[in-house]
Amino acid sequence: MSRFPDWPSNATAGPPRPVSREDVLSGSGPRGVALAAPWDPVPPGPPADVDYIVDSEAPEDPPRRFRTLQAAIDRALRDGAGMRADGRRVIRVHPGFYEGPVFLPAEGPPMALFGAGREAVTLAARIDAQMPGREFEQRFGAGFATAHPAIRAQFARIAARERVTTGNSAVLRIERDDTIVAGMTIRNDYACDRAGAAPLGAEPDVAGRYAEGQHQAVACHVAGADRVQLSALRLESFQDTLYLQAPSQGIGRSVVSDCAIEGDVDFIFGGATAYFEQCEIRSRGLRGAKSWAVAPSTNLWMPHGFVFERCHFTHDGAEAGRDATSFLGRQWFEGVRATPYSAPNEAGYVSNFGDVNRFEAPQGRISRRCLEAVGKCTVQNSALGTHISTDTPWDDWSAGAWSPRYRPVQATAGDFLSHLGGWLQDNGLDYSDLEARDFWLRIVTCTTGIT
């Protein structure tokens, strides 16, 4: 193996420096203001005692033994806090196959879900962002007919939608702070085969999969929760495998340890803060899609987005995406409709600052939340496979021909100021207190040569 070049290579502030776990989980927010108490989680181990058992092969025996994970969660919600100091309820999942989706709502006690191992326990469902709400209801409604009211309400909200959307496509949705999930595979079985989600005229491969289109299908969604631990998991999908969503207020922190995460398009994404340690991040070339492993949308004022420590970025060996043709990632321009970046190729195009994101050709608006979803990521002390280019590890958002959603790579705050200086002034926006030398994207002390 050889050294992967530190990135960015031409930084005026000198080479980027590694980020500590303590810093990432400190709870610091905009301008160093504490949004939450520092968090120093210990690795989750097998519980000495449990409150509920989930076993797909054994007879159901409430209030302790259940055949589905959702039924055990429902019971925990009804029982309330347990006898542990933190009130946590612990669920042990025996070997077997379990059908999703599973909702873990913000209400109720904190929970820990411990599976028998990612080779032994599989939680799976086939859900994609373009699935009609009617189809969602028909496919999964029976499993939620007697669920806890909070869960029934969540299910009803999704089923009432015309399309479920990315944020409702997860096999496991986590809304509760202090959740632990360990020792299982969570898989979204959607095969990128919905013709209506593919570009007009696109042809599928021999397995019916489309390489392009809107094929978002989340395996695990941390939906604004804080202090979440994901450990010893396998997370599988194609596009949008792991969604780490920032809360509307405060901070959302996750620690992802000893996990195998695989996908092709933006398969680790979101605006939350997350520390990944000793994980395998596996790019899939199976359906021939262009691949970006990460797509952070971190707020401009948050100090950290995704940090990868001692991780391995690998490839599945398929023909597509090998030999420096995959990207480490791109910065998700979350919600954009009318970009203020670069020279447009559309006559009369104008993008102005406003309250909402909107584009009615040739004029559009961009909100502060969208503008400040800049995306931050550090990869350090890790091994990057030869599928990732050493010259251009990061890609523009909506790369290629200019579009109303385009944004170039922004490695530092200085790039943001350089690209938008005149536009910011014209729209009365002042970002003079940004430190131009602050790194938003970094690759530090990494190696390459693995496959």
Image (cartoon, rainbow, N blue to C red):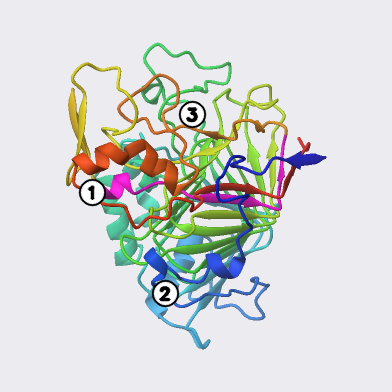
Visible in this render: residue 59? no
The answer to which of 20 and 271 lies nearer the viewer is 20
* Badge 3 vs badge 1, beta-carbon distance below 8 Å: no
Amino acid marked by disc 2 = Ala
* Whole-number angstrom distance, CA of label 3 to CA of label 2: 39 Å
Examine the rendering and report whether any part of residue 17 can be seen: yes
Mark 2 element type: loop
Q: CA distance from mark 3 to mark 1?
A: 41 Å
At a point 70% along the width and 56% down the height, the residue shown is: 278
Specify the segment rendered in magenta: 368-385
Which quadrant, please, contains the N terminus?
top right
The residue labelled by disc 2 is 36
Q: Which residue is mark 3?
A: 192
Outermost residue toward the right in this view: 1
Q: Position of residue 106 (x, y in %)?
A: 37, 68
The residue located at (36%, 60%) in the rendering is 247
> Label 1, on which residue?
429
439 displayed left or right of 132: right
- Front: mark 2 or 1: 1
Q: Is residue 278 above or below residue 62?
A: above
> Closer to the camera, 347 or 84?
347
Residue 265 placed where, x, y %?
A: 51, 34
Q: Is residue 44 magenta?
A: no
